[in-house]
Amino acid sequence: MIQWGLALKNFVGPAERPDIDELIRYSVRAEELGFESLWAWDHVILGVDPSFPILDAVGTLTAIAARTTRIRLGTGVLVLPLRNPTLAAKTLGTLDVISNGR
């Protein structure tokens, strides 16, 4: 059986502001429509103009996990060399608890 997932737009272009409320509405609707998973992208530093904002992938997924119940959550990439291992374990563990293992 084919399972369908969606990418989250946890980033915006220059001069825009990320809208977490819209991301949550999008995620809740995706769950209602039966999508299997949502994926966020993690880039600590994009190497472009600093006005190119990107929300933290794990933090974004944690906010979504608190407002959904079934849809699975993941990162398309997680740049571990740029993260403190202890803090990465803590934040990912928190996501695991809040999402009930999703």
Image (cartoon, helix red, strand yellow):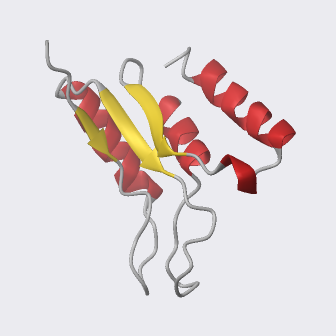
Q: Vertical placement of 39 versus 15: above or below?
A: above
Task: Residue 98: name its quadrant.
Answer: top right
The residue located at (73%, 56%) in the rendering is 82
Nearer to the camera, 62 or 82: 82
| Quadrant placement of the N terminus | top left
The residue located at (56%, 79%) in the rendering is 47
Q: Is residue 55 visible?
A: yes
Q: Position of residue 27 (x, y in %)?
A: 33, 39
Q: Position of residue 66 (x, y in %)?
A: 53, 30
Q: Is residue 67 visible?
A: no
The residue located at (19%, 23%) in the rendering is 34
Task: Residue 56: name its quadrant.
Answer: bottom right
Q: Vertical placement of 64 versus 15: above or below?
A: above
Nearer to the camera, 67 or 36: 36
Q: Position of residue 13 (x, y in %)?
A: 39, 78
The residue located at (44%, 30%) in the rendering is 73
Q: Position of residue 79 (x, y in %)?
A: 62, 51
7 horizontally vs 86: left or right? left
Q: Residue furthest front?
A: 81
48 horizontally vs 25: left or right? right
94 horizontally vs 69: left or right? right
